[in-house]
């Protein structure tokens, strides 16, 4: 134990300087470039698709209910909803609780407005990247597989660019972010049990929690995408509903304060005080930055999960993943924001207190029991993110090699990072992830912009079928000018017209029987 304590202490001390340098570089990158690039690309896609994220909200909900058919390999396919929950598992995590509190602490109430803005604009980017993930997916050993690396290689003939993206996403999500999520679980549980884990204290508690999380995660990780999606299909809706109910209770208890909270959000977003003091840019940056890190729009993460789904048309998963951005930011993040803002007593400028701010706010509103409730919520959110983040890494490792030995080695390394997150201070890792996220955004959005003509063609194909009263289906022969679409060869039953005609016939018979 003493050796472990000394090692952790040495790591924390030796990385202090690096943390400061990386934080400064990351802050400059986001404030001076990425913030504008994200908005510009989102607006470009919004104009190119005629506001797809606004005019197709009904279609988002409709496609989410599509049935799971039978894949090319004879197995029951991963439905659009199950693929949605895998990406939501990564999206709905500690960022929704700690990240939002951090944005408010460092940027004030106005940061919440800019989180909403980045979600509204980013939903268009999410649509485009997830459509591309579906369009260029390929048949894997156990399911479809795809993502940005695949559409960079197949759509742009730029495997080298795909390999750069693989490096970013594997390090950031499969290693760094799984450690961050474990660290959040340890912090939350320590708060509930009154365990001091400051510095190198409480190491026995840290190790115990880390081992438990690593073992559970290991069983799921080694089960593959079908096990992962079966877990997230249950875990994500349950945890999200419970958290939303808790937030609504807080809102209901403070209805008289809501107008004032909304006024603070909008005033802070464009406030004279923020403009005069020079903090307006900080407000905008914090809101957009934390909003992106929460909903991941345009980062190239969700397409990895979305590509696993068997759907009748590539545009369908674009609609589903755009809905995921709204779900994450407009619902879950907003709930956290209202919980924090109605409680008052926000330690503005104190980054260290952001981690426990939401718990403290809930305790103020609902009593000490709420701390324990939120501990469970954070644990579920963080654990689901570990699973989702791991799968992003797996799908990209498969881009490099399909061999079992490298994949199993990768899985073991992920589990080590899951445990490492329980025992180490993660200031350096968190800020490094911020920086690497910026690299992911640049690489992915460059590819998406270059492939937008193909996105528009596929979207028009979808909309022309809907106008004709047909359930949209897609096969590679429909757009022969787009190459490398071997997953769309018509062997998946969901892409066959006869499948949907049969569903329509059964639906008509059922309605007729009910009419009698």
Image (cartoon, grey):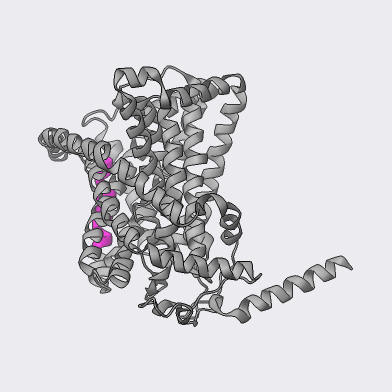
168 in relation to 100, above or below: below
Tell me how many marks there are.
0
Q: Residue at x 58, y 27 (%)?
A: 251
Task: Find residue 390 and report its image quarter.
Answer: bottom left
Q: Position of residue 66 (x, y in %)?
A: 59, 65
Residue 464 lies, with reference to residue 123, above or below; the image says below
Q: Which quadrant would residue 103 be assigned to in this image?
A: top left
The answer to whether 150 is drawn above or below residue 100 in the figure is below
Query: Residue 72: image x %, image y %?
Result: 47, 80
Q: Quadrant of the C terminus?
A: bottom right
Question: Which residue is located at x 30 percent, y 18 percent?
Answer: 277
Q: Is residue 501 visible?
A: yes
* In the rendered image, the vertical position of residue 502 relative to residue 264, given as above or below: below
Residue 425, visible in the rendered structure = no
Which residue is drawn at the image coordinates 46% and 48% (left, top)?
325
Residue 347 on the magenta segment? no
The picture places residue 493, in percent across and down from the top left corner, at 55, 79
Q: Nearer the viewer, residue 223 or 315?
A: 315
Q: Out of 222 and 426, give the one closest to the viewer.
A: 426
Which quarter of the image is occupied by the N terminus? top left
Residue placed most toward the observer, 317 or 230: 317
The answer to whether residue 474 is left or right of residue 271 is right
Q: Position of residue 205 (x, y in %)?
A: 30, 36
Give yes or no for residue 411 being in the magenta stretch.
yes
Identify the main secondary structure in magenta: helix
Q: Nearer the viewer, residue 482 or 244?
A: 482
Numbered range of the magenta stretch: 410-422
Q: Quadrant of residue 447?
A: bottom left
Q: Left of 432 or right of it: where is 50?
A: right
């Amino acid at each position: 134990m003493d050796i472990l304590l000394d090692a952790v202490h040495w790591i924390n001390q030796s990385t202090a300087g690096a943390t400061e340098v990386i934080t400064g570089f990351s802050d400059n990158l986001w404030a001076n470039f990425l913030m504008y690039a994200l908005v510009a690309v989102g607006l470009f896609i919004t104009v190119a698709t005629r506001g797809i994220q606004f005019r197709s909200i009904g279609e988002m909900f409709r496609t989410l209910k599509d049935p799971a058919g039978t894949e090319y390999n004879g197995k029951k396919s991963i439905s659009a909803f199950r693929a949605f929950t895998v990406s939501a598992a990564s999206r709905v995590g500690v960022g929704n609780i700690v990240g939002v509190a951090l944005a408010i602490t460092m940027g004030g109430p106005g940061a919440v407005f800019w989180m909403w803005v980045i979600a509204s604009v980013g939903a268009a980017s999410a649509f485009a990247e997830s459509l591309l993930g579906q369009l260029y997916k390929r048949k894997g050993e156990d399911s479809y597989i795809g993502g940005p690396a695949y559409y960079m290689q197949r759509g742009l003939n730029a495997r080298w660019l795909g390999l750069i993206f693989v490096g970013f996403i594997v390090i950031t999500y499969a290693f760094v972010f799984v450690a961050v999520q474990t660290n959040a679980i340890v912090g939350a549980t320590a708060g509930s049990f009154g365990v001091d884990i400051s510095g190198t204290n409480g190491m026995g508690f840290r190790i115990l929690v880390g081992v438990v999380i690593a073992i559970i995660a290991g069983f799921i990780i080694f089960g593959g995408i079908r096990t992962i999606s079966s877990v997230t299909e249950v875990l994500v809706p349950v945890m999200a509903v419970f958290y939303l109910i808790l937030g609504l209770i807080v809102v209901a208890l403070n209805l008289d304060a809501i107008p004032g909270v909304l006024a603070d959000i909008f005033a802070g977003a464009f406030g004279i005080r923020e403009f005069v003091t020079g903090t307006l840019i900080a407000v905008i940056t914090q809101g957009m930055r934390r909003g992106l890190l929460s909903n991941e729009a345009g980062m190239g993460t969700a397409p990895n999960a979305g590509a696993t789904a068997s759907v009748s048309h590539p545009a369908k998963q674009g609609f589903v993943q755009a809905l995921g951005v709204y779900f994450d930011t407009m619902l879950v993040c907003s709930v956290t924001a209202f919980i924090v803002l109605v409680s008052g007593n926000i330690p503005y400028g104190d980054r260290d207190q952001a981690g426990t701010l939401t718990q403290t706010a809930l305790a103020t509103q609902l009593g000490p029991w709420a701390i324990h409730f939120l501990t469970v919520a954070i644990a579920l959110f963080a654990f689901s993110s570990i699973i989702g983040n791991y799968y992003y890494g797996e799908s990209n490792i498969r881009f490099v090699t399909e061999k079992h030995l490298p994949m199993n080695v990768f899985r073991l390394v992920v589990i080590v990072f899951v445990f490492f997150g329980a025992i180490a201070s993660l200031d350096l890792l968190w800020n490094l992830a911020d920086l690497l996220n910026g690299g992911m955004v640049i690489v992915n959005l460059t590819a998406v912009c270059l492939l937008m003509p193909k996105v528009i063609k596929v979207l028009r194909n979808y909309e022309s079928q809907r106008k004709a009263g047909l359930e949209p289906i897609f096969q590679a022969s429909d757009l022969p000018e787009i190459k490398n679409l071997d997953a769309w060869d018509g062997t998946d039953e969901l892409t066959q017209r006869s499948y949907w005609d049969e569903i329509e016939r059964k639906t008509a018979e059922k309605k007729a029987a009910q009419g009698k």
